[in-house]
Amino acid sequence: MVTKKDKAKLKESRKPAQAKKKEVTGRVEPDQRIKDLEEQISKTKYNKRTQGAIGLMKAQLAKLKEKKEARASKKTVHEGYSIRKTGDAAVIMVGFPSVGKSTLLNALTNAESEVAHYAFTTLTVVPGVLDYKGAKIQVLDVPGVVAGAASGKGRGKEVLSVMRNAEMTMVVVDANFPEHYEQLQKEMAEVGIRPNQQPPDVRITKKATGGIRVASTVKLTKIDVETVKIVMKEFRIVNADIVIRTDISVDQLIDVLEKNKVYMPTILVLTKIDTISSERLDELKKMLNPDICISVHKKYGLEDLKELIFNKLSFIRIYTKEIGKEADMKEPMIMLKGITVRGMCRKLHKDFETKFKFSRVWGKSAKFPGQKFMLDHELVDGDVLEIHLN
């Protein structure tokens, strides 16, 4: 329930937004409003009584930032980076300047990215190809991200926009500067990247009348129905049916409404571990919980990193076999985990699904070699598939 105090807070928080509707002649007022809201949110303790007010402030903040970004995009022309995507997936390496991304790229791929012992060596995007287990994975080395990148500092917007178009992000952190990781997380969040997250399962159906009706199939512990309605109305949605199927927060609801977030697998690579003590490395493992620790100089962890990239992309290898012939074990088809025989038929030829009779499978997904399966059978890494058609 929203108390009288809460209603007063909501009314007070709306005042600056209403005042903002007046003509703004300078750039200070919107920026100051954003700063004020961020400060208000940070100072307000989150609990059941305040979540409605915080939800409103966060919705207002998101809209202000969106408007600011739209205005900046109209006024500024960025040169940008143009990269032609090739292979089975694109992985972008993101990190502060001089963390060893170029050296790592050269060690993983056939690229020749310039390496030097000073910052900002890479001034453009350098692509390389990691050829691993039959997969061709494009790895991109971009200029180092600096604090304030999401706001345009150091061509950061262009770098982060390339990141939004990749299938995976590799965050590279120098073991000597672990504090960079927190800043990188902030910059990624500012441009709408949600690492290692799944899109919230929220269905919104707009309607002409009837107000806002909220239903959930799970217990909501981070947001209540009243806060959902407050946020929706701030986004000018006053009539809608909402079904929530995951326990979401206010921020996740705003993400759903903005429809501009990118959800992608991300790995944290702690590099240059040969330059610190084993005791310090143990401390950093507890502090950052990196996915892998490597030393390019000592050639430590590189093969494990290749395997991690392959698995994090959810790749599996499927080999095809013609009837009465040996399987082609040299060139696998690189598919995503969860692929079925039906999915393989669609990949191989447009008529295979309609003419499908049955399939035979050799590998871990079969109980015995050459077992018969129909279209809905799920394949696993290393399976050999033979399709029979009518």
Image: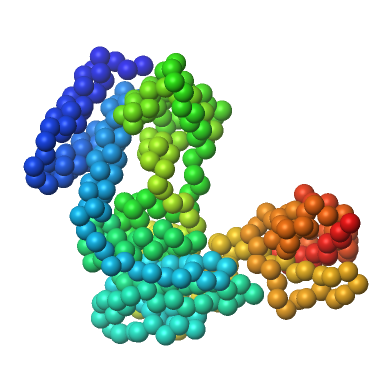
**Percent of width and height locating residue 182:** 32, 57
Give the residue drawn at x 16%, y 45%. Answer: 31
Left or right: 190 as drawn, with respect to 267? left
Q: Nearer the viewer, residue 270 or 165?
A: 165
> Does 12 sit above or below residue 310?
above
Residue at the limit of the structure toward the right, as seen here: 324
| Image quarter of residue 280 | bottom left
Give the residue drawn at x 36%, y 60%. Answer: 161
| Image quarter of residue 163 | bottom left
| Image quarter of residue 12 | top left
Colour treatment of the image: rainbow
> Does 367 sit above or below residue 275?
above
Give the residue drawn at x 41%, y 48%. Answer: 261
**Percent of width and height locating residue 19:** 14, 30
Quarter containing the N terminus: top left
**Percent of width and height locating residue 20:** 15, 33
* Residue 167 visible here: yes
Q: Nearer the viewer, residue 11 or 159?
A: 159
Left or right: 142 as drawn, with respect to 390? left
Left or right: 360 as drawn, with respect to 328? right
* Residue 280 visible here: no
